[in-house]
Image (cartoon, coloured by chain):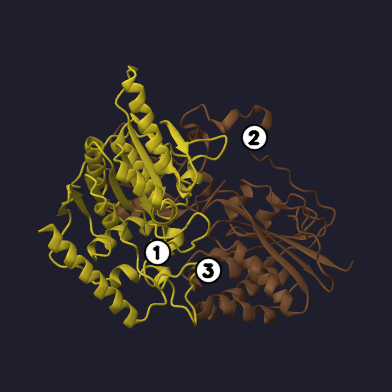
Amino acid sequence: MDKLTEIRWHGRGGQGAVTSAELTALAAIKEGKFAQAFPSFGPERRGAPVLAFNRISESEHIRVRSAVTQPDIVVVLDPGLLYIVDVTSGLKDGGALIINSSKKLVDIKLEFGGPWQLAVVDATAIALELLKVPIVNTTMLGALLRVSDAIKLDSLLEPIEERFGKLAQRNIEACKRAYKETSVAKLSPTSKKVERVYAKESWPSWQELTPGFVVTEPGNARSYRTGDWRAQRPIFNHDRCIKCGICSLFCPEDCISQNGDGYFEADLYYCKGCGICARECWTQAITMVEEVKE
Amino acid sequence: METLGIYVPRLVTRRQSFAPGHRACSGCGEALAVMLVMKALGRNVIVVMSTGCMEIISSQLPYTSWEVPWIHTLFENSAIVASGIEAGMKALRRKGTSLPKTKVVAMGGDGATFDIGFGAISGAFERGHDFIYVCFDNEAYMNTGIQRSSATPFGASTTTQPAGKVSMGQSTWKKNMPAIAVAHDIPYVATASPSYPFDLMNKIKKAVAIEGPTYVHILSVCPTGWRIPTDMTIRLGRLAVETGVFPLYEVEDGKYTLNYDPPRLRPVEDYLKPQGRFRHLTPKMVKKIQQRVSAEYASLKEKAQ
């Protein structure tokens, strides 16, 4: 068996993790290698955490079809995910962890350091500047190129052009920019993984299920937190608010309600950060700001 | 027509039976539509829902967003199951069981309504069961990944009819489902949009009060499938109405009423331009769409007079 590189992408639905994986595989195939790309997600939608996987083999067929559990490289497209999902789970010693974050490398290292190579790039800023949207798939490819030699930039160009058409040039630019701006820490094989505790969802076993899968507690989805999906949060400016409540009427999560003073507030436990309230507010009392976790 | 004004909290109840914590995409127009429908329906209902986005996102085991009796059926069955429940309640009442006044509501997406459950709905309308059928139309099979349905408008790019060098996206026109419902001679047919929430809730309340089959068609903007930013959901719904692409009207016993009739329609371009699924349209195709929309709107207006 020759060298097999396994990559795991952590992103959110709609952010382009799946596209990143596909482009990586296409580039590798173009180089005459064997490659796979496939996503993994639940029934959740845009904004929910998703995974995408790559396997790249130099010269042998890849027979494995299962999800990647022990990756060589982990790429994190959304900095918020770092605190919800254990992104380094199964990451091999001597592997690489590539993170999209506006934080400095030294700060990230304190939180997510370990026996792997750490790379940080502010991909969201680059994407917003060059592409005008916070979709960081091609930008993170640049960071991947910097850290790994699994694929080359030249072989990426054609798949990007095919996928993005008119927008290809700007995507390539973003990719090159990220390649330059990625800061990479030296590999220190002796450093230990910083332990963190992650909330785990518990599922009932099949013995506990009711016949016909009847759910006996009405509306128990209220206990399910969808606020983690949020990339932006609404900020309510009480000086401009006229207490009309149009925000509460148009909220698809029904999470905006009136507080004691008559002003409106979003319940961030559910808010997915769609921005409808900010868009529809008559007096523009609501603004959306980037979500910063921790 | 919209008495939107201000002070929503005094006009609309906060009580509704579709709990947050559902897993719809951020900015989902359909989840909002369901919520508004539930606000108007109140608690005394039995909801039957076809397979589709709303079923998937609201009922992932072991959770449910529903606080009323809710039954998930297969794609084609919601009208059939609703008929059965209604007939069952009738039979129980005949045998002397006292039941509270309960409305049966069948809900389905455009796939379930336009394509897969089409025959069953027609049958239920024809038999005259006392139920409401609510169609949440997001103009494609969004749940499985934006495949075309017969509700997909002309020119829209979907994953099964993608726009490219050969294809120009959807090559056929959208099926006129409200007109088909009207053709069944049922007492009430209406179109609504969550961008006009009071209009939507009034129509649902009207449908509840009417005995016999009623049909409410709701255009639910889908940011994922229409390829628009998530905060544009409400605006796009409004543009659809203002351009005449999706006119708001109701038909009571064959009598048409236009609920929103602007003095001048906006050009369809305003509606098509923000959407990624129409990005490839040439001016010639836009003109073709404009002609069709204008003609359909004119004929609707004639009926409403």
Can you name the residue that lies furthest to the left here?
B305
Residue lying at 39% horizontally and 73% vertically, measured from the top left: B155
Q: CA distance from mark 1 to mark 3?
A: 32 Å
**Circle on res. B152:** 1
Residue B20 is situated, as x and y percent measured from the top left of the image, at: 44, 39
Can you name the residue that lies furthest to the right here?
A1
Would you say residue B239 is visible in this rendering? yes
Residue lying at 42% horizontally and 43% vertically, measured from the top left: B78
Residue lying at 65% horizontally and 38% vertically, measured from the top left: A200
Residue A177 is situated, as x and y percent measured from the top left of the image, at: 60, 75
Q: CA distance from mark 1 to mark 2?
A: 39 Å
**Circle on res. A202:** 2
Horizontal side, residue B65 vs residue A101: left or right: left
Which hue is chain B drawn in?
yellow
Among numbered discs 3 and 2, the one appearing first in the sequence: 3
Circle 1/circle 3 CB separation < 8 Å = no
* Circle 1 crowding by C-alpha within 10 Å: few under 14, some 14–19, many from 20: many
Q: Nearer the viewer, mark 1 or mark 3?
A: 1
State the residue position of label 3. A127
Q: Chain of mark 2?
A: A
Give the residue type at disc 1: Thr
Residue B65 is situated, as x and y percent measured from the top left of the image, at: 46, 36
Would you say residue A148 is visible in this rendering? no
Q: Nearer the viewer, residue A26 or A49?
A: A26
Horizontal side, residue B69 vs residue A216: left or right: left
Q: CA distance from mark 3 to mark 2?
A: 36 Å
* Circle 3 crowding by C-alpha within 10 Å: few under 14, some 14–19, many from 20: many
Q: In this picture, is A28 found above or below A55? A: below
Q: Dot 3 lies on which element?
A: helix
Q: In this picture, is B59 found above or below A130? A: above
Give the residue type at disc 2: Ser
Which hue is chain A drawn in?
brown
